[in-house]
Each structure stands twice: as structure tokens, then as C-alpha cells.
Image: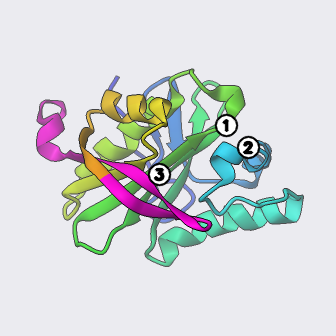
Amino acid sequence: MEPVYRIGLIPNSPHLTDGHTCVRAWTFEDLPSVHEASCDPSIAYGTSLPGVFSDKEGRAFIERQWSRFSSGEGLSLVVAENSNNKATGYVGLFHRQQLGIVGLGYWTVASHRRQGHALDAVKLITRWALRIHGIYRIEALVDPLNTASTKVLEGAGFLREGLLRNFYPSGETRLDMTLFSLIRSDIESEF
């Protein structure tokens, strides 16, 4: 099914769907997903999720997601089940230092993993972004041991470019990260 595009709550924010998954703007109705994600150490690490969830902190998290667009940082959206609009995760695109390059981030709450929503969301947002004049490359960084994320990226057409040693700060140490990228010519047949 061809993705459907329409304006969401944030100016120029896409509402994308493939019939199974939708990608849309955050609302306060998404607080249960924020709560679940905040309690999952595999998600909360390295994100702006509340360390200890409260309704106030959850709302502040959602408001930060809205502000990412107005600040020019990027675009942070909800991943949801298309059938009931229930939030299952997050997907975001953020500007890198180099013009025309954006970074991709995403997570899925534990109760909705292995249902295809992360792969669907990554495909929807990257195809939408690569249609925008001025975006030429999308990058994703993944912990080399995160096989689920690696499968999502490879399923969406990303190519593994290499290992960035001692790249990501983690407390007193630094972690290796695998660099993946997607450019228009990787998915030319889809345009």
C-alpha cells in the first residue's frame, strides 16, 4: 500500500500510514507508552525519557518532542498501531552537522515488540524524508550487540558502513557503535 501523507498537529508534521502502522504527532493520550518506555532500561538509556515516570514528567517529555520541530532540532513522532491509534513506540529524525544529513532514532515498547511496527515506521519516515529536497542521507547508530535494531535497519534497506570504535559516551567509558546509512539510490525503485 502506498503511504498516505497529511499534516498532523505540528506544522509540516507528517501522518504516515501503511495500513498496519502509522507515524504521527505526539498527544497526551500517548502517556501510557511513555510510562512503559520510561520503565525499560534498554530504552530509557540515552533518551530524554523521564528517569522516574510521573504524569508531570511524561507530559514534559511529550512537550519536548513537540519543541524539537520548532527549535529546528528535528522531528520526533509516535509509532502507533493503525487499527486503534495506540502508541507502540517512537521514531525521530534529527539534523546532523553536515547539511543534507539526518540521524534516525527509534524505539518500541516491550509489549509491542516483534509485531513489525519498528520496521514499518522506519520505512515510512525514511521514504518520506528522502522525498524532501535537501535531505540526501539518513544515518543510524546501533550498538553492535543490538541484533533486533540491526534487523530493522537492514530490512528497511540501510547499509552497514562500519564500526565506530569508542564512539558513544556511556558513563565512565565509551561504547562502539555500528554506522548504517540510507540514501535515495539504495531505494530508487520505490520512488
Measuring from the top left, give residue 10's x and y in whole percent: 53, 63
Q: Nearer the viewer, residue 15 or 182?
A: 182
Quadrant (top left, top right, bottom left, bottom right) of the N terminus: top left
Measuring from the top left, give residue 86's x and y in whole percent: 69, 34
Q: Sequence-wise, which precedes: disc 1 or disc 2?
A: 2
Please state if 109 lies on the left or on the right of 75 as rendered: right
Q: How far apart are the two marked residues, 1 and 3, measured between alpha carbons?
A: 14 Å
Measuring from the top left, give residue 186's x and y in whole percent: 15, 38
Please state if 190 lies on the left or on the right of 77 as rendered: left
Residue 189 located within the stretch drawn in magenta: yes
Q: Nearer the viewer, residue 19 or 170?
A: 170
Which contiguous range is marked in magenta? Answer: 164-191
Asked if disc 1 and disc 2 are in contact, CB closer than 8 Å, the reply is yes
- Up the image or down, 185 lies above or below 131; here it is above
Q: How far apart are the two marked residues, 3 and 2, measured between alpha carbons?
A: 16 Å
Q: Residue furthest front?
A: 173
What is the secondary structure assignment of the residue under circle 1? loop
Mark count: 3
Please tell me whether mark 1 or mark 2 is closer to you in this view.
2
Q: Residue at x 61, y 27 (%)?
A: 113
Quarter of the figure with residue 89: top right
Please state if 88 lies on the left or on the right of 22 as rendered: right
Q: Which residue is mark 1?
A: 109
Q: How far apart are the two marked residues, 1 and 2, measured between alpha carbons?
A: 8 Å
Residue flagged by tag 3: what amino acid is it?
A: Gly
Label 1 packing within 10 angstroms: few (<14), some (14-19), many (20+): many
- Up the image or down, 21 lies above or below 166; here it is above
Q: Residue at x 86, y 65 (%)?
A: 56
Q: Which residue is mark 3?
A: 105
Asked if disc 3 and disc 2 are in contact, CB closer than 8 Å, the reply is no
Please tell me the numbered disc located at residue 40: 2
